[in-house]
Image: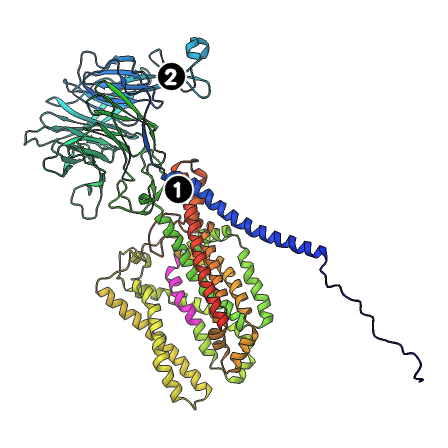
Amino acid sequence: MSSDQPTTDSRPVVRKRSRKTRTSVLLADRFAGLLIKLGGIGTILTVSLVFVFLLWVVFPLFLPAAMQSQEDFPKKLASQSSSLIHMGVNEYLHITWTVDSDGDLVWYHSETGEQIGSQALFPGETPTAWSFSLRGGHVAFAFEDATVRLGTIGFETSFVADDNLPDEVTDLPIGDGVPYEGGILERTPENQFRLQTLVADLQDPIKVDVDSKITLIDQSVSSKGKIFALLTENGEFRLARVTERKNLLTGKITTKLREGKTQVELSDGSAPNHIMLAGLGDSVIVTWPDGRAERFDCRNASKPTLVETVDLVESPDARLTAIEFLIGKTSIVTGDSDGNVDVWFRVKPEDATTSDGATLVRAHRLPAGDSPVVSLAASPRSRMVAVGFEDQSVRLFHVTSNQELSEAKLTDGNLPATHLAIAPKDNAVVSINDDQLQVWAVDASHPEITWSSIFSSVWYEGYAEPEHAWQSSSGTDEFEEKYGMMPLVFGTLKSTFYSMLFAVPLALLAAIYTSEFLHAKAKARIKPTIEVMASLPSVVLGFLAALFFAPLVEDIVPEVLTALITVPFAFLLGAYLWQLLPASLEVQFRKYRIFGVAIALPIGLAMAYFFGDSVERWLFAGDIKAWLDGQIGTGTGAWMFILLPLSAFLVIWFVNSLVSPRIRSAGKHWPRSSFAQIDLVKFLVACLGTVAIAYIASAILNTLGWDPRGSYVGTYVQRNSLIVGAIMGFAVIPIIYTIADDALSAVPESIRAASLGAGATPWQTAIRVVVPTAMSGLFSAVMVGLGRAVGETMIVLMAAGNTALMDLNVFNGFRTLSANIAVELPEAVINSSHYRMLFLAALLLFVITFVVNTVAETIRLRFRKRAFQL
């Protein structure tokens, strides 16, 4: 080829690439960054707004109550008797009525003090004793001729057409009332005219067979009928149940008495000043001015029996100055000359010596006043009590929360509030003293709620001692609401503990196995199958737990408990038997080990079924349910629950520290089969030693008199913590397993190779190298599972019995915060205490989750830092 011939360059022509990023890419990058930033900020704002909303709903629970004197009060009453025995007010605060000792009923217009009407209840007669009920307007009067008249004093409501009303009435502002035809006519927000009139309806006199004047009387009215108790001046105590029959033709009511009597001792010369008949008519308390009280058991109405004597005042010089029943006529409120205000009710302690098994106890002491108590008024709607003191102060208390809500002072007059009444809607307190009518508006929306009543034990009516309790509703209006959060928090922690106890070991061990030992092809099929478990609706799991597993387990409790031992034993025994295979066969069948593991489960269950009856006879006296109730047997079996795992750890430590090193030292030249046989024998001896140590220790503790029944084991309930732990653990396992497996799989293969190359076995590599490296991910998996368990609703709602209890018993149920919200929120009245307490439960659940996640993230970061150091 000629040297001057031009040569052709065959290299491809390379276009020069622009080093400038296109505008569209920059815009897309900025847009994506903005979206991510907005998403993060939006998430934070959303969570913050949820917290703020919960706080906004809950905050009014803790606002202080107030009593505010109404404008233009006090009012001078137009006509006022000097011997009032009772007063009341209607629910709209327009009418105040009084009854005096002569039996005259007078009612007034509250806004002006003007008398609207009056009525002589007993013309020509003067009552010697009287009783007025808090609810229903029931009254009872006794007379000199040993007769008793029962009846009601209450308000009748009707609506008047505005066509027949004068112009000055039709122009009434909404909410105002004026006297009209012996009542008060009020214009309602619906633009109707409501007329309320006071009506007294008294029955014919009932003759009582007594020999002297009746000085005290009280009555109770319930679904079982009327009953009254009376005391005469010579100490004769009568209890009478009233049976009424109405003639359908004439309308006449025939009254029949079923009486019982006894004698009250009057040896000290002083006369009793009060008789108090309980709402059910099963107990009567007679009190004296010096504070002495005698309680009579009246369950047998024909034979009242004195069961105990109690001193209602502490100081020997103090006097009992006032006494009233709370709503329901179970608790009594007493006031004395030292200014003390106490609440008493009957309880049934185990060591009671009375014939009815009950004892009258002082359950609450409300904040004392600086002067003697002169009057008491209980609310007809709640547990509020208004107390008038001699220094002209009036204080408002709430019994359940044991707090003083507010205090007011009489502004005019020289006498204290000798008569008090709380309005039917709890929105006002009314007093009469020195011909003066005083009205205070009350703003106490949630008087039963305090931090102490929520998180501390409270002595509720009828309870033997202060307790934590949640019970927001009942079948009667007299019910004492219980808003203790601790049973719900306890139930949440209990369900979480048992579900995590079941789920965490299985999920983590499964993740370690599939990540480190299972063949990749098998893992590709098994892992998605486990993850599918997470898609099962919790309501389906709860349904199965409540209607299938709970009844099934109830019939085979000994077998289930035995399976907790035999199933792990079967797996471990299978592992030791596998070691007996010759090396060539072990390598050949290694890929089929999973089938051996699958066979171990039914073998363990079969062993539990076979040995269940024997275990029941050995540890549970042949009947585990009677044993759990404490009816038969000893506490040895209960101690085995705790001591068996502890003795297992002790035996493992002993074998690994003392036995195994000696065997390895002595068997340096032994063949593989000999080591396998020695390992099998060592395992079997260790199992027997574990059971023996646990049983001996349990027997010793039982001999010392320590029987744990009634604590972490107790009466068996079909829907219990054991069922919930297993089923909810089944729901949590896929979440923990998936995240844990991903964390283990993310460990670089170079770390595994380095460990194996250094001579470590696959098991040593997994436990000592891979797991520590992936610890932050494993911890995150557990925390995500914990969050799932804490917030679970449907499973615990359907399978846990849904009873708010603080009971460690694994065989009893509970109620969680989330389940409580789901059950009760649809029925809660908006803005009521119940409604806001449910939001407080939600706020508490929010805070618990937030705190747990924050702590978990802190710990996870520490694990991650250590992993980087590896």
Q: Is residue 591 left or right of residue 86?
A: right
Instruction: Pick whichever, 669 or 411, lies toward us.
Output: 411
Magenta region: 555-570
Q: Is residue 376 visible to us here?
A: no
Whole-percent x, y for residue 342 in the image = 21, 37
Q: In the rendered image, which quarter contains the N terminus?
A: bottom right
Residue 404 in picture, x, y percent from top left: 27, 36
Observer-nearest of 658 and 451: 451
Tag 1: amino acid: Met
Report if residue 160 lies within the magenta region: no
Q: Residues within 10 Å of mark 2 (few under 14, many from 20)?
A: many
Give neighbour class at mark 1: few <14, some 14-19, many 20+ (Cα, 10 Å): many
**In the image, residue 131 lies at what x, y percent?**
22, 24
Q: Which image quadrant is residue 706 in?
A: bottom left
Residue ID at (40%, 36%): 832
Choose between 98 and 157: the one closer to the eye: 98
For label 1, the residue is 837
Note whether 64 is above or below 214 in the view shown: below
Q: Name the residue beneath numbered marker 2.
A: 177
Q: State the residue lying farthest toward the front.
A: 4
Find numbered disc 2 in the image and state the secondary structure of the residue it sits on: strand
Q: What type is the residue that disc 2 sits on?
A: Gly
- The residue positioned 43% from the left and 46% from the top of the image is 842
